[in-house]
């Protein structure tokens, strides 16, 4: 499987399903993730290696939110990259507040696997979802 949009779609589906084995199989051993500055829970930053991204970023997201990424566009870029646009939708587990936040991801591929993910999203939506509801 070396079709970039197909690999990306499988990654998003596997993330939504919590399929750790498939996620790790799609990430290059030299994977690096760069996430949006200002994300809550100190999640913005750089994650070196597939396990760091899985455990420290995606795992932390799963503990705090029931959320998934819903891609709407896959646009090829030069240098073995793919731009993915879409929306995160979910609910914060602690507050019960729903949220939607647009995203763009730039995925870089090496030998058919994702070797880099650069994430841009509306960090304010993620933060607001964690705040207690006014009705509590």
Image (tube, grey):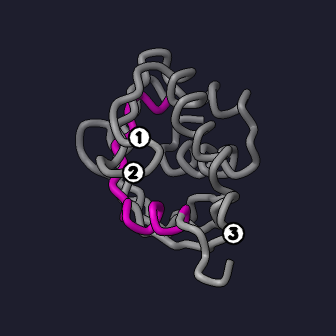
The residue labelled by disc 3 is 96
* Extreme residue in the left direction: 78
Work out how far the residue at label 1 is from the one at label 2, CA to CA, in angstroms.
6 Å
Residue 36, compared with residue 23, is above or below; it is below
Q: Earlier in the sequence, mark 1 or mark 3?
A: 1
What is the quadrant of residue 34 in the picture?
top left
Residue 115, compared with residue 129, is above or below; it is above
* Extreme residue in the bottom direction: 135
Image quarter in which the C terminus is found: bottom right
Work out how far the residue at label 2 is from the one at label 3, CA to CA, in angstroms.
18 Å
Give coordinates of residue 117: x percent, y percent: 39, 39
Residue 109 painted magenta: no
Q: Which mark is residue 2?
A: none
Residue 65 in sight here: yes
Q: Residue at x 59, y 52 (%)?
A: 9
Q: Residues within 10 Å of mark 3 (few under 14, many from 20)?
A: some
Residue 110 in sight here: no
Question: Along the horizontal axis of the image, is 114 left or right of 19?
Answer: left
The residue labelled by disc 2 is 39
Image quarter in which the N terminus is found: top right
Q: Residue at x 56, y 42 (%)?
A: 7
Element type where label 2 sits in the image: loop
Residue 28, compared with residue 135, is above or below; it is above
Q: Which range is magenta?
A: 113-130
Give coordinates of residue 118: x percent, y percent: 34, 43
Element type where label 3 sits in the image: loop
Q: Residue at x 33, y 48 (%)?
A: 36
Work out how far the residue at label 1 is from the one at label 3, CA to CA, in angstroms.
20 Å
Q: Which mark is residue 42?
A: 1
């Amino acid at each position: 499987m070396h079709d970039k949009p197909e690999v990306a779609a499988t990654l998003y589906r596997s993330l939504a399903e919590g399929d750790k084995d498939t996620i790790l199989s799609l990430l290059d051993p030299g994977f690096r993730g760069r996430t949006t500055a200002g994300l809550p829970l100190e999640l913005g930053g750089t994650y070196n290696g597939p396990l760091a991204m899985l455990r420290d970023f995606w795992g932390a997201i799963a503990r705090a939110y029931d959320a998934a990424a819903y891609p709407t566009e896959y646009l090829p870029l030069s240098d073995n990259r793919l731009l993915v646009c879409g929306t995160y939708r979910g609910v914060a587990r602690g507050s019960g507040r729903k949220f939607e936040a647009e995203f763009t991801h730039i995925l870089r591929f090496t030998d058919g696997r994702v070797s880099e993910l650069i994430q841009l999203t509306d960090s304010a939506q993620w933060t607001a979802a964690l705040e207690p509801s006014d009705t509590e």
